[in-house]
Amino acid sequence: METVGLAAALWWAGTGIIAAGPGGWFAGRAMGSDDDFIHGVLSWAATTLIVPFFLTSVRGGALAGALGQVNFNQPPSLQQTQQAPA
């Protein structure tokens, strides 16, 4: 089952990078100047770098929020051992 998850993640990442190519091409063509190729490549590269950063940040924040709701330690009242009456 882990192989399916890994394959899906790789497929998603690969298709996302490939799909950003037409977006970069369109950005370059829409620029309308002599630097359209460079503009398109830079748009593609920036998207390829920024999107994974945001996705990992969101995932990390969600994980930290979920773990912050779970208290792995006992409350202080339970941590104190009861002393035997003298």
Image (spheres, rainbow, N blue to C red):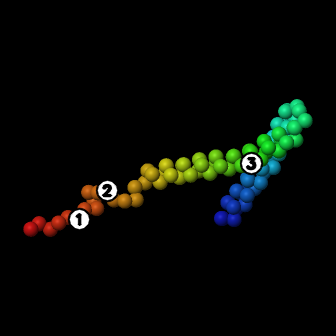
Circle 3 residues within 10 Å: few <14, some 14–19, many ≥20: some
Give the percent coordinates (x, y) of residue 47. 74, 44
Closer to the N terminus: mark 2 or mark 1? 2
For label 1, the residue is: 81
Task: Indicate left or right for 1 with 48 as reference.
Answer: left
Residue at x 29%, y 57% (from the top left corner): 76
For label 3, the residue is: 48
Task: Indicate left or right for 55 with 32 as reference.
Answer: left
- Up the image or down, 80 lies above or below 60; here it is below
- Up the image or down, 62 lies above or below 79; here it is above
Seen from the viewer's position, the closer of residues 50 and 35 is 35
Seen from the viewer's position, the closer of residues 18 and 29 is 29
CA distance for labels 3 and 2: 45 Å
Of marks 3 and 2, the one in the foreground: 3
Kind of residue at badge 2: Pro
Task: Indicate left or right for 28 with 16 as reference.
Answer: right
Circle 2 residues within 10 Å: few <14, some 14–19, many ≥20: few
SS state under label 1: loop
Name the quadrant of the C terminus: bottom left
Residue at x 44%, y 50% (from the top left corner): 69
For label 2, the residue is: 75
In which image quadrant can residue 8 be found? bottom right
CA distance for labels 2 and 1: 12 Å
Name the quadrant of the N terminus: bottom right
CA distance for labels 3 and 1: 55 Å
Residue at x 53%, y 52% (from the top left corner): 63
Closer to the N terminus: mark 3 or mark 1? 3
Tell me, for residue 47, which label it has, or none: none
